[in-house]
Amino acid sequence: MKKNAYEIGVISDTHGLLRPEAEKYLEGSDIIIHAGDIGTIELISKLKRIAPIYAIRGNVDKENWPDEFPETMELEILDKRIFIIHNINEFNIGNEKNYDIIISGHSHKPLIKKMNDILYLNPGSAGKKRFSLPVSIAHVKISEDKISAELIELNV
């Protein structure tokens, strides 16, 4: 049976640290997207216990990582096209019109921005706290006629 809405947990820049607070918010997700800088393969195993996971490599995940973790990924959920890239600065401008959502990580700066009918999402960093940036993840809901997103700051 086809679902008419999907709950998606979005996480990035864990650098090997999966906080219990992040796990709590990811519970109930239909799928989880990890936008790179995973840190350890074991972290992926933990996320798979919560929900099916789609993950890409980030700049810290380069050496000896399995091919199952590409540098970019495309997904389609309820006819909504999603592109996942770790560093948005490496995205080929001009291709964005092909997508409904572009998810990135890398900067550790959480962002939700709608521009030209495209949702740009960076969940921020769920790993070790850096500088004055929050520790955060994101939640996306996709239905047949709507896309909504929220940032969730973790109290750590």
Image (tube, rainbow, N blue to C red):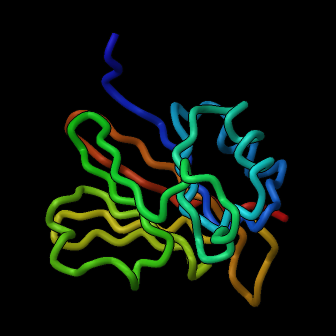
Task: Tell me: residue 88, above or below residue 96.
Answer: below
**Horizontal placement of 14 versus 120: left or right?**
right
Residue at 24% across, 64% down: 118
Specify whether residue 125 is in view: no
The image quadrant that residue 34 belongs to is bottom right
* Number of disc labels: 0
> Which quarter of the rendered picture does the C terminus lie within?
bottom right
Task: Residue 48 in the image: state x and y as whole percent.
Answer: 67, 35
View extreme (top): residue: 1
**Horizontal placement of 79 versus 120: left or right?**
left
Specify whether residue 75 is in view: yes
Task: Tell me: residue 146, above or below residue 10.
Answer: above
Residue nearer the viewer, 134 or 70: 70
Task: Residue 58 in the image: state x and y as whole percent.
Answer: 59, 70
Residue at 34% across, 9% down: 1
**Horizontal placement of 141 versus 147: left or right?**
right
**Horizontal placement of 85 versus 102: left or right?**
right
Task: Residue 110 in the image: state x and y as whole percent.
Answer: 55, 73
Task: Residue 54 in the image: state x and y as whole percent.
Answer: 52, 45
Residue nearer the viewer, 114 or 51: 51
Residue at 47% across, 78% down: 87
The image quadrant that residue 47 belongs to is top right
